């Protein structure tokens, strides 16, 4: 491996204080949202981070962008540890990492025109004159499939898919190295999903972008990503090249997730069995040394082990 | 919750003392004293002796501590303008008419206002709504002494249905109670209307209809209860504000209530009475807000039973 | 007698700047024990159809007309308030999309299920409560007694959706409408809920109308499919035919645009453009601006809904 990965997360931990118990005598309990997460996003690749609600995938994305602070661990962007940088030192790195969220409606300020919205990052980082900024913004609107004339319109005049395009244009106008996309297609219709997925693929190839694609929709992830990491209860339980996840899932949670995907063949309906969260927690695979591709020291705690080239599974090794 | 209450009680105590200092200082900063001019000019020697008798010649902080020491023993001193009784006795005497008239005004005006607001919300954008909203707006914008004047003119003079003044018999109470009722009625009409419209737009109301509940049941069992929670919390402070007497209503209807004393005690530099009134109001409002907060938490299941389960 | 019979339903909302034509001539029918899926994207009119059938839209501003709109033989359009209240919950019930906002926050789940039962049956309070508990058990809730006394904010989305299903079925309705019942849920919970709905439908012999934008849900759950676009029905067919041999260009495009059907990173087949503006739908076929096979006639004349095979109809000039 030559160049440093675009983004690396090492041993990230994050807990939130939640109220627990009845209102009168509420206590605050620490809820671990992200536990010991290690993730590498290589250059020029799309990594899918998959999980259900409560898995910690969105929190991981926020930690990567330092939109929330980790309790421990490191966030490394292009070889530099940015975990403890202050606001001023962090600013140049903010140019390298951008984000697109699920709800395009609340992501765009309704008082601004599309041109102003897309140009704003240039404004914040003081790049170019006002005229140049507007020109760049219009150019990017075109690149994401909206005509330049849309520059004078307002967000409420657009459809969901169009707004998401604007959000993508705004995210990419600074030519970042890393794009964190948190469920960007979940709120969109099927036909529009396809448009946005294709758009992301094209832009990624053109710009050599690395994308951390957070989603609960496995079908979208299958068509878009190179690698997939599956999160469950704040931990990564499996990570592998995309097709390996779909054709050879090793962790019971991954299997249950894949099993739940609706099958597009009405003649092939079957009754499913479902495992509860507790059952899945208890079902950590037990492996012997011989099963491993890369040996590890045995431990009483579950750890991520390599069972095939680039294929990691959380397991107990005897 | 007990922690919450204790903390609030502690902060109320602190507020109490801070207010007492502020009022005391402000009171004494106004030029002139209680025995300066007025109707009976007195020779300076006599005046100085009276001042010494009341301890008014001493430094301010001494006066303050002496007064507050008395307050902690529930001794609020003697009103200068009426030395024959204690401040407590005066307040006790004068408060009765205000409490009766103001209190009844609130107790009558509130349900009327709620009904008005409900009608407006349920018949939104029809003449019922416009009429109810107009009445509510008028109730809030027309000053209460103007309302009192109109009531006296129309009902006591022109129609001769009731009495223009006095407070000796219950028949005389009608007009002042109506005057007092206008503010709570108007306030609750507006509050109820917007709270109900808010609730009616919520998704669960559509679900209630889809279940086949009658519209009446939906309104009275579900919508009203949801709207009521914020409205309940406004009641106590409003009650206190009204039941301590309005100087205007009491002046117009010649009711010997507490309202007049709020102003006269400042005018006549009646320090003990003034302090007592201010402190009383402070404590009552603080307690009212505390009770409202507790009530709100108790009525709202999301606060009463917090937490999330699977 | 068919359980649900709708003929030429039209729903419009006059607004300040024009009339929003949410549904422009929709017809469907469902028999007892049958399940129908209405699939479409946002703006297709699928949810409005459901709400209109139970008269749950505010009228005015909504304006609902139809040649025929019957539930279990009862004319819904001419029914008065009391008849409608009797129908809803007892004859036809509905499960909604967002379970978190579907319950009244100041009452317990048990109270809300019991009041549904009490609205339609003459039972004692304790009997209604017992029935509510039995229903919660039937939707596979493990500790029904505790859930009865819980408030909505104390439960998760999946739990609440089960409770909503229990509430809808508490009076044993003949028809169940499900408006995107799993859209707000995780994929594993979605699978459980769909399986639950299907199982209960078979058990109770109900008619089921499932509204969704997700063709996967359709494939797993229903017998027949109605595809809506721009307020109109584009295609109607048995579910196997829709997936094996879709005929309408929109249906074909929709199936082609679905991600994850084959392995590997790939470019998906897009449908260019966006859904039509309901306030200003295009003339002719609503899909023609985005249709690869559209011709001149498609742009001017709205296609008639005609048979294109056994038990299949479609509205497309190119299929005639």
Image: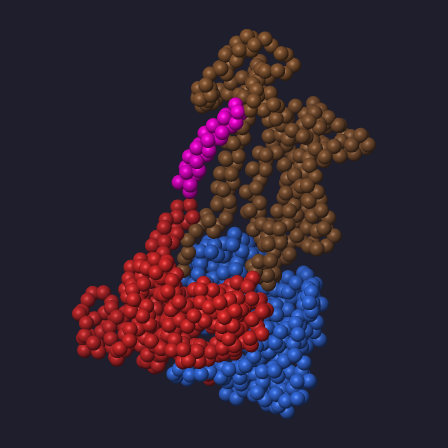
Chain colours: A red, B brown, C blue
Please state the total of marks drawn on the protein image. Answer: 0
Q: Residue furthest bottom?
A: C320
Q: Quadrant of the C terminus of chain B?
A: bottom left
Which residue sits at x=54%, y=56%? C104
Locate residue A232 relative to residue A308 in the image: left or right. Answer: right
In reply to whether residue B16 is colored magenta, the answer given is: yes
Query: Looking at the image, which residue is at 53% across and 11% down?
Result: B48
x 50%, y 26%: residue:
B25
Q: Is residue B268 left or right of residue A188?
A: right
Q: Quadrant of residue B237?
A: top right
Q: Is residue C102 visible?
A: yes
When the figure is inspected, residue B130 is found, relative to residue B267, above or below; the finding is below
Magenta stretch holds residue A84:
no
Nearer-the-camera pick, A162 or C320 = A162
A104 vs B106, left or right, is left
Relative vertical location of residue B261 with respect to residue C130 in this rendering, above or below: above
Give whichever of A3, C301 is nearer the camera.
A3
Q: In percent of the image, x 55 and y 75: which residue is there?
A: A148
Locate residue C7, reporting x and y percent.
67, 77
Tell me where the magenta segment starts and ends, as one range.
B1-29
User: Quadrant where the N terminus of chain B lies?
Assistant: top left
Is residue C5 shown to the viewer in this render?
A: no
Residue that sits furthest to the right in the current view: B158
Which is the main secondary structure of the residues drawn in magenta?
helix
Residue C230 lies, in percent from the top left, at 62, 77
How far across and how far down the image is residue B87, in percent? 55, 20
Give percent across and percent down for residue C255: 50, 83
């Amino acid at each position: 491996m030559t160049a440093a990965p675009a983004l690396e997360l090492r041993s990230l931990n994050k807990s939130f204080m939640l109220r627990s118990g009845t209102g009168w005598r509420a206590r605050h309990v620490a809820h671990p949202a992200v536990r010991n997460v290690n993730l590498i996003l290589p250059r020029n690749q799309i990594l899918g981070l998959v999980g259900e609600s409560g898995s910690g995938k969105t929190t991981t994305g926020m930690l990567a962008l330092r939109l929330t602070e980790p309790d421990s661990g490191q966030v490394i962007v292009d070889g530099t540890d940015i975990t403890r940088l202050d606001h001023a030192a962090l600013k140049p790195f903010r140019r390298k990492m951008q984000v697109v969220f699920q709800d395009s409606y609340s992501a765009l300020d309704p008082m601004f025109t599309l041109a102003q919205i897309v140009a704003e990052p240039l404004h914040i980082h003081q790049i170019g004159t006002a005229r140049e900024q507007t020109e760049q913004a219009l150019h990017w609107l075109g690149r994401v499939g909206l005509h330049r004339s849309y520059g004078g319109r307002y967000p409420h005049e657009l459809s969901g898919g169009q707004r998401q395009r604007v959000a993508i244009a705004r995210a990419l106008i600074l030519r970042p190295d890393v794009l964190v996309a948190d469920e960007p297609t979940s709120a969109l219709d099927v036909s529009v999903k396809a448009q946005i997925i294709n758009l992301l693929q094209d832009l990624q190839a053109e710009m050599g972008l690395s994308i951390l694609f957070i989603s609960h929709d496995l079908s979208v992830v299958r068509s878009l990503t190179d690698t997939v990491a599956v999160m469950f209860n704040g931990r990564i339980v499996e990570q592998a090249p995309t097709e390996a996840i779909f054709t050879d899932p090793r962790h019971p949670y991954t299997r249950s997730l894949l099993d739940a995907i609706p099958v597009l063949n009405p003649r092939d309906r079957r009754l499913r069995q479902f495992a509860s969260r507790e059952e899945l927690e208890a079902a950590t695979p037990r492996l012997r040394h011989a099963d491993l591709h890369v040996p590890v020291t045995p431990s009483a705690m579950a750890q991520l082990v390599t069972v095939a080239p680039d294929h990691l599974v959380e397991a107990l090794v005897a | 919750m007990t922690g919450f209450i204790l903390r609030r009680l502690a902060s109320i105590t602190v507020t109490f003392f801070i207010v007492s200092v502020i009022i005391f200082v402000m009171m004494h900063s106004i030029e002139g004293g209680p025995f300066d001019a007025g109707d009976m000019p007195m020779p300076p020697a006599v005046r100085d002796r009276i001042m010494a008798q009341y301890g008014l010649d001493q430094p301010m902080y001494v006066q303050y501590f002496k007064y507050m020491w008395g307050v902690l023993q529930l001794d609020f001193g003697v009103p200068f303008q009426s030395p024959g009784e204690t401040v407590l006795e005066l307040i006790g005497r004068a408060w009765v008419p205000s409490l009766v008239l103001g209190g009844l005004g609130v107790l009558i005006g509130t349900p009327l206002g709620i009904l008005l607001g409900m009608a407006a919300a349920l018949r939104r954008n029809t003449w019922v709504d416009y009429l109810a909203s107009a009445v509510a707006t008028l109730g809030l914008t027309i000053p209460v002494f103007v309302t009192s004047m109109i009531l006296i003119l129309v009902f006591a003079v022109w129609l001769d249905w009731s009495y223009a003044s006095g407070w000796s018999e219950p028949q005389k109470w009608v007009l002042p109670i109506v005057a007092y009722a206008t503010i709570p009625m108007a306030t609750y009409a507006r509050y109820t209307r917007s709270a109900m419209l808010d609730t009616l737009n919520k998704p669960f109301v559509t679900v209630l209809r889809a279940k086949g509940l009658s519209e009446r049941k939906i309104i009275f069992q579900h919508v009203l209860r949801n709207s009521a929670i914020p409205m309940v919390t406004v009641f106590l402070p409003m009650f206190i504000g009204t039941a301590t007497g309005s100087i205007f209503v009491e002046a117009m209807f010649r009711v010997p209530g507490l309202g007049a004393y709020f102003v006269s005690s400042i005018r006549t530099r009646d320090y003990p009475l003034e302090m007592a009134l201010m402190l009383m109001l402070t404590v009552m409002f603080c307690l009212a807000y505390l009770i409202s907060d507790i009530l709100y938490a108790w009525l709202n299941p999301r606060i009463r039973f917090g937490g999330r389960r699977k | 007698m068919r359980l649900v019979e709708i003929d030429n339903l039209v729903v419009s909302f006059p607004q300040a700047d024009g009339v929003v034509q949410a549904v422009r001539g929709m017809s469907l029918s469902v028999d007892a024990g049958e399940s129908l899926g209405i699939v479409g994207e946002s703006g297709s009119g699928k949810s409005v159809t459901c709400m209109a059938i139970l008269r749950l839209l505010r009228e005015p501003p909504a304006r609902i007309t139809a040649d025929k709109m019957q539930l279990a033989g009862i004319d819904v359009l001419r029914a008065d308030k009391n008849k409608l209240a009797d129908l809803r919950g007892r004859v036809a019930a509905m499960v909604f999309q967002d379970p978190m906002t579907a319950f009244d926050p100041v009452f317990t789940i048990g109270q809300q299920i019991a009041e549904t039962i009490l609205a339609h049956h003459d039972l004692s309070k304790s009997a209604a409560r017992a029935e509510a508990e039995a229903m919660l058990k039937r939707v596979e809730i493990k500790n029904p007694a505790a859930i009865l006394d819980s408030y909505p904010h104390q439960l998760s989305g999946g739990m609440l959706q089960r409770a909503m299903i229990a509430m809808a079925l508490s009076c044993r309705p003949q028809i169940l409408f499900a408006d995107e019942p799993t859209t707000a849920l995780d994929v594993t919970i979605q699978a459980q809920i769909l399986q639950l709905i299907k199982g209960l439908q078979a058990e109770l012999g109900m008619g089921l109308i499932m509204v969704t934008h997700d063709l996967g849900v359709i494939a797993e759950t229903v017998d027949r499919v109605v595809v809506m676009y721009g307020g109109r029905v584009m295609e109607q067919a048995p579910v196997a035919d829709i997936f094996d041999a879709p005929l309408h260009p929109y249906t074909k495009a929709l199936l082609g645009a679905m991600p994850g059907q084959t392995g590997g990173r790939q470019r998906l087949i897009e449908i260019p453009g966006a859904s039509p503006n309901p306030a200003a739908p295009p003339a002719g076929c609503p899909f023609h601006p985005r249709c690869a096979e559209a011709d001149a006639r498609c742009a001017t004349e709205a296609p008639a809904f005609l048979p294109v095979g056994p038990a299949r109809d479609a509205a497309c000039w190119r299929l005639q």
